[in-house]
Structures are given as C-alpha cells and as structure tokens.
C-alpha cells in the first residue's frame, strides 16, 4: 500500500503545491504530519497504525493552494464535510484515500506497556503485532488490543470520495464502544458528577479545539474572545465544561467523529462521549451523518419550518 | 541531612501533610497523571511523569487579584486585594526539571517588578523532588543546565533505592521537613543512593550545546520561510505552553457576576491569536509562524540574552510528548543552529 501511495503522490506532485502525509516523529511510537513539497520528501512518508492525525485539520488554513492530502476513512469524512460547508474548495484538493486497518490509541498502548511510552527504545510492526523494547523489556502487543475506539466502531474504513484510492478495500464490522455504553447508562446526576471530576483536570489548553478539523473559527473562537467576554477565563470545572458544551453544540451535525479532540487532549479527557452522543441525536432527528455524502448540507445550516424528524404538532 | 522513607509510607506521608498544609502531587485519574491538590483517597503516581507541571504551586492557572463588591447599584464598589493567605504548600514528587522550572522565571516576578502573589507562594512552597533513574525519549534537562538529580529549586531530593527513597535535604527548610516522624534512619543506604544518582546521570543522552542558539535564532528573525516551514504542522493550540513549567505569561480579565466582580489572572499562551491582539484590532503576530517564532525564540534567545544566559526551558519535554502534532522544540532550535545561509 505504501509504495502504491508513494507512486500516486509522485505522479501528481508536479501539479500540486504540497501534499499532506505522515512521517515518523520524535520516537518509534509517534508519527507526525509531513508536508511533502518536493519529490525527495515522498521517501519519508509512512502509513499505518501510527498515522493517527487527521490532516484535514490543516486544509482550511491552506486556502488558495493546490493541496494533496492522504486520508484514512474517518479523515475523508472531514474533507467531504469541509467542502459541503464551503470551508474548502474541493477542486483545489487532491484526495489520496487509504483503505484503513485502524490506528493505535496511545492511551491504550500505555496500559499494555511495562513503563510509560517515553521509555521506548525500539518498536516495529510485524503485520498487526507490535514488537517493542520499552525500559529494557521486550513486549509484543496486538493492534486489536490497542485500537482507537473510533476504529472499533468504524463504519467507513475505505476513504470516501477519494480521487485516488490505495490498498485493498475492507468490509466494515463496527462494534459498539464499551465506554460509551456505560456512560449512557449513568443517571444525569452521575454524569454530572463524572464531568465535575473529569473537568477538574482540564487545563483549558484548547488542543481539542484546534485539532478538530471542523472547528474553523480558530483565532476568533468565542472561548478566547475578550470583547465581548463570553466565557470566564477561570480554569474551573464549570467554565471548562461550559467550553466543551459550546464545542459540542457548534459541532452538532458537523462532527465527523474523527476523534482528534480526544486524541489531542494532553490529560486524556474522554471528549468523544459527548460528541458521539450528539451525533446520535442528530442522526435520530435529522437522519444525517456528517461527511458521508458529497454535496449534502448539514441540518443546522438549513432551515425548515417543520423538520420531518421533530414532532411539533402531535402533542 | 539524609533520611529514609519506606515506599509503603509514601501515601501516609501525603495523608498526614494534607492535614496541615496544601499538598500538590502527581495523582492518577482515569488513565492520566496530573498534579492535583491531594486529598486522602487519591492515588499517588510516581512511576510516570505527570502530564501537567507543578507550576500551580507558585503560579496557579487562575489567581484572583482583587474582588470588587458593589453593595448598591451605581455606588462605588468596595475593592479588596486578595493576596493569598500565608499557608504552607508542599509539592511532593515533582521531577527535578519541574522544581527548576520556577527558578527560571523567578527573576521575572521578583526582579524589577515585585509580584506579591508569586512571592508569597514561592516563600510558602517546599519542593520534594523525585530523582529520575531513566530519561524518556523527550527528556533533555542536561542540555539546558539541569539534570536528573539536579538540586536547583528543590528542598529535598528523593532518591529511589530498594524498598523506598533516600531523602536528601538541599535547603534548611528541606532538612527541617526530614524531621517528620515517617522518615527513618538512613542506615547504610547512602552509597546505594549515590550509585543511583551516578547511574541516572550516565543514562542521559549526550548533551546538546545550545550556546549558539540566541544569536542563531535572532539571525532567523525575519526569515518568514524558515518559520513557516518549522510551524507548518503546529495547530497553534497552546497545549505546549500550558504544560510548560517555565512559561509564565498571564492574562488579566474581570469576571463580572452582578454586584460582585473578580479581577483574575490566568495563564496566557503565546500560541494564541489573542495574545498580542491590540485594542486597535492590529495584531503584530497574526499567524502561527509568528507565534511559534516567539515561543521558541523567547525561550532560547531573548530570555537568555537578558538573563545571564539562562535558557527559559527546563528540558522536561512535555511540550514534545503531548503536542498533538508532534512538534519538537529541540528540532526547531537545532535547525536554526545548523542553518547555513
Ligand atoms: S476510524 Fe476507521 S478509517 Fe479511521 S483510523 Fe479507524 S479504522 Fe481507519
Ligand atoms: S469534535 Fe472531535 S470527533 Fe468531532 S470532528 Fe471535531 S475533532 Fe473530530
Ligand atoms: S484538550 Fe483537554 S485539557 Fe485541553 S482544553 Fe480540551 S479538554 Fe481541556
Ligand atoms: S507546538 Fe504543538 S502543542 Fe504547541 S501550539 Fe503547536 S501544535 Fe499545539
Ligand atoms: S527532563 Fe526527564 S530526566 Fe530530566 S529531570 Fe525532567 S523528567 Fe527527569
């Protein structure tokens, strides 16, 4: 798959300003976004379980350029959604789609290791088994045991709406996400207590916001605007949770469930619990799933006097 | 002064301290480790470096500066300064880099300007650091003037040995702390502790020489292309600055709640657009390239050039380890140092 992708990128590169992909980062457990500007850069490209980042996040900031982008299935939904909302010009983007086998959750991986991720000395994938040496100990971990939750629930492993699709297509076999089920089973009071405790460790860093491909206010976000001052700057569970509620509401019907918000959070706050819940609500009410159909407008960007899914007259 | 703390007594020590002072300690919660105000029942986690830094002990993320209370509408409010009351704070189990962090920015708050809030917290805080036995891939303390057993900024160093910790005092306050009943006679463990320290220092990767960084970064000041390339994958979130033990920038806002207003100081972050947004609407640092240039250059160039060569980075590597995009500040400074015109 990697060679096929490299060939496809090399042949399209002359007509593009740059191509977004991944390369290995500061240690053997981390890939990092790669900007391919010339043919030699293609050699550094990697794909696979470390390619966690949703590169669509960079697209709105590259307006006016001819950009190629490598996407997994989930990432491809963000590209479609951005184009559907007019936030990028689809004709300026060349989508190199992957048929994806899933990515790791670094949080889950950490639990399988004898010491923290930072003590890695060597790591290598052999098919779907990771063999690594961490703090002097040999470990082997199966990808299926450290797969990101979004991959367990994945309905679209093969990139949608791609200009070039590489790899062999996979059949989706989505499974329910255990933590979501147990969260939904909590009473409202228990949910509130859970967020009180969890939001106490939020540092209001906004990594969740900036990693999100659909958060496009960025520099002009309501959370940091000073005039007017919409949201208190205090770092308290109440203000922190308020910020999350704003994020969730602004993403209602737009969130492509790529999980970047949760992955980016440096203190492992399970933000997808809120996003998945809201996505279910928009699916139930509007039969709409963000980023899955080219050309579709999200429900909150349209207005109908009476929504088909909302019973307003039936008492 | 040198004493011994059995590993089994660590929680008892934290529990006991929590009864008489504020204890800031790394606590495990749902898969993450962060510094929290410790309460008995929380789970201390010493085996992993906390994601957040112990900075809150001397410079909390939110600090009320004053409270204005209006007893009647349209009447002058009564304004009260809210200097924190004198109260001892013990930071238990930070790493040497974290303890050193506050020493680096101390001169900013206690120099030409005297910040009473920082001064009081600094005076009241005792730092009990845990010596590291093995560096992580992101650790580079020894390249920026520190080390895995560096005493700078610590009152006591805890050195992990068989069955517990050898506790060595660095300051007088630290020696007094070691009088606590849970510490035992150190016996013959001193030699074992020395060996751990020597081994820890030897385990660090070779130091990088940053001495040319101030001039080299300054030379790149106007190089838009260099900074655009270096910042390309940055998403300008600011997670790096919020986790940094040495970042000290703050914002002051008024929290208005009807008849009561609080003027609060909160951590600010140079990676944010609003950081330099001027009242006129003009912003001298409109792009992430401008902002990353400032963050890196402030730490490795502007700060050392006015503070006797001290680099405003303690090498803890949190900004690298937790950056959602994998931006590596070491690599950026190296790139500037190696840049050939
Ligand atoms: S959610 Fe699906 S497409 Fe996305 S990384 Fe996981 S398996 Fe791949
Ligand atoms: S809210 Fe989270 S899951 Fe949804 S699109 Fe944004 S980053 Fe992805
Ligand atoms: S990324 Fe995590 S810590 Fe940062 S603001 Fe979001 S929830 Fe809070
Ligand atoms: S360097 Fe990383 S953590 Fe810092 S602002 Fe950029 S993306 Fe965020
Ligand atoms: S940088 Fe790493 S090795 Fe050095 S003091 Fe900090 S945690 Fe320890």
Image (tube, coloured by chain):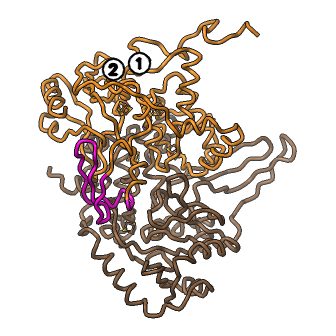
Chain colours: A orange, B brown
Report whether B20 appears left or right of A78.
Answer: right
- Across and down, in percent, residue B221 comes to 29, 49
Q: What element carries label 1?
A: loop
Q: What element carries label 2?
A: loop
The answer to whether residue B103 is above or below residue A228 is below
- Across and down, in percent, residue B337 comes to 22, 57
Q: Nearer the viewer, residue B134 or A248?
A: B134
- As for residue A133 lying within the magenta part, the answer is yes
Q: Is mark 2 within 8 Å of ligand 1?
A: no
Q: Nearer the viewer, residue A134 or A174?
A: A174
Report whether A216 appears left or right of B62.
Answer: left
Report whether B86 appears left or right of B321.
Answer: right
Residue pictured at 46% horizontal, 36% vertical: B282
Quadrant (top left, top right, bottom left, bottom right) of the C terminus of chain A = top right
- As for residue B305 lying within the magenta part, the answer is no
Q: Mark 1 points at which residue?
A: A292
Residue pictured at 55% horizontal, 24% vertical: A280
**Chain letter of the residue carrying label 2:** A
| Res A242 → quadrant | top right
Q: Which residue lies furthest to the bottom in this view?
A: B187
Quadrant (top left, top right, bottom left, bottom right) of the N terminus of chain A = top left
| Res A211 → quadrant | top left
| Res A60 → quadrant | top left
Q: Do the residues labelled 1 and 2 touch (CB within 8 Å)?
A: yes
| Dominant secondary-structure state across the stretch colored magenta | strand
Q: Residue A160 carries which label?
A: 2
> Range of the magenta residues?
A114-140
- Across and down, in percent, residue B286 comes to 41, 37
Q: Which of B135 and A49 is in front in this view?
A: A49
């Amino acid at each position: 798959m990697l060679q096929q992708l490299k060939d496809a990128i090399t042949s399209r590169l002359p007509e593009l300003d740059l191509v977004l992909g991944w390369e290995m980062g500061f240690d053997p457990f981390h890939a990092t976004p790669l900007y391919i500007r010339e043919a030699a850069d293609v050699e550094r490209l990697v794909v696979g379980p470390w390619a966690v980042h949703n590169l669509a996040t960079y697209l709105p900031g590259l307006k006016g350029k001819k950009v190629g982008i490598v996407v997994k299935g989930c990432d491809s939904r963000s590209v479609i959604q951005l184009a559907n909302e007019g936030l990028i010009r689809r004709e300026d983007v060349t989508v190199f789609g992957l048929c994806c086998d899933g990515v790791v959750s670094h949080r889950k991986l950490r639990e399988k290791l004898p010491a923290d991720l930072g003590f890695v000395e060597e790591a290598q994938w052999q098919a779907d088994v990771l063999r690594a040496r961490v703090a002097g100990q040999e470990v082997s971990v199966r990808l299926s045991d450290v797969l990101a939750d979004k991959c367990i629930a994945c309905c679209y492993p093969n990139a949608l709406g791609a200009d070039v699709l590489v790899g062999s297509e996979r059949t989706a076999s989505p499974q329910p996400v255990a933590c979501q089920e147990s969260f939904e089973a909590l009473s409202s009071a228990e949910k509130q207590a859970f967020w009180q405790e969890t939001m106490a460790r939020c540092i209001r860093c906004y990594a969740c916001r900036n990693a999100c491909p659909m958060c496009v206010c960025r520099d002009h976000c309501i959370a940091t605007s000073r005039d007017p001052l919409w949201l208190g700057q205090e770092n308290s569970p109440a203000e922190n949770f308020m910020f999350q509620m704003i994020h969730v509401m602004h993403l209602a019907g737009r969130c492509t469930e790529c999980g970047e918000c949760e992955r980016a959070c440096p203190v492992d706050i399970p933000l997808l619990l809120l996003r998945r819940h809201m996505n279910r609500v928009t699916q139930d009410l509007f039969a709409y799933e963000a980023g899955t159909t080219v050309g579709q407008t999200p429900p909150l960007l349209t207005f109908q006097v009476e929504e088909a899914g909302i019973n307003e007259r039936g008492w | 002064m040198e004493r011994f703390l059995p590993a089994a007594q660590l929680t008892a020590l934290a529990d006991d301290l929590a009864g008489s002072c504020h204890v800031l300690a790394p606590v495990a919660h749902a898969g993450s480790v962060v510094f929290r105000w410790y309460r008995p029942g929380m789970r201390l986690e010493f085996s992993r470096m906390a994601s957040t830094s112990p900075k809150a002990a001397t410079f909390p993320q939110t600090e009320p500066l004053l409270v204005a209370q209006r007893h009647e509408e349209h009447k002058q409010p009564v304004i009260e300064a809210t200097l924190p009351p004198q109260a001892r704070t013990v930071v238990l189990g930070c790493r040497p880099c974290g303890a050193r962090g506050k020493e680096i920015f101390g001169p900013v708050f206690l120099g030409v300007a005297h910040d009473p809030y920082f001064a009081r917290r600094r005076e009241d805080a005792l730092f009990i650091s845990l010596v590291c036995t093995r560096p992580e891939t992101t650790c580079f303390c020894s390249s920026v003037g520190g080390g895995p057993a560096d005493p700078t900024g610590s009152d006591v160093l805890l050195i992990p040995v068989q069955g517990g910790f050898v506790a060595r005092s660095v300051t007088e306050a630290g020696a007094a702390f070691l009088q606590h009943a849970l510490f035992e006679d150190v016996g013959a463990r001193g030699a074992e502790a020395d060996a751990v320290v020597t081994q820890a220092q030897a385990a660090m990767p070779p130091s990088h020489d940053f001495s040319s960084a101030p001039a080299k970064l300054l030379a790149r000041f106007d190089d838009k292309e260099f900074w655009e390339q270096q910042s390309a994958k940055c998403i300008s979130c600011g997670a790096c600055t919020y986790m940094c033990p040495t970042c000290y920038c703050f914002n002051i806002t008024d929290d208005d709640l009807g008849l009561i207003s609080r003027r609060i100081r909160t951590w600010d972050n140079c990676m944010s657009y609003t950081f330099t947004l001027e009242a006129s609407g003009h912003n001298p640092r409109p792009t992430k390239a401008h902002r990353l240039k400032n963050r890196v250059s402030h730490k490795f160039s502007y700060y050392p050039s006015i503070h006797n060569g001290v680099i405003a980075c303690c090498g803890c590597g949190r900004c690298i380890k937790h950056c959602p995009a994998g931006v590596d500040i070491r690599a950026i400074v190296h790139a500037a140092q190696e840049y050939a015109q």
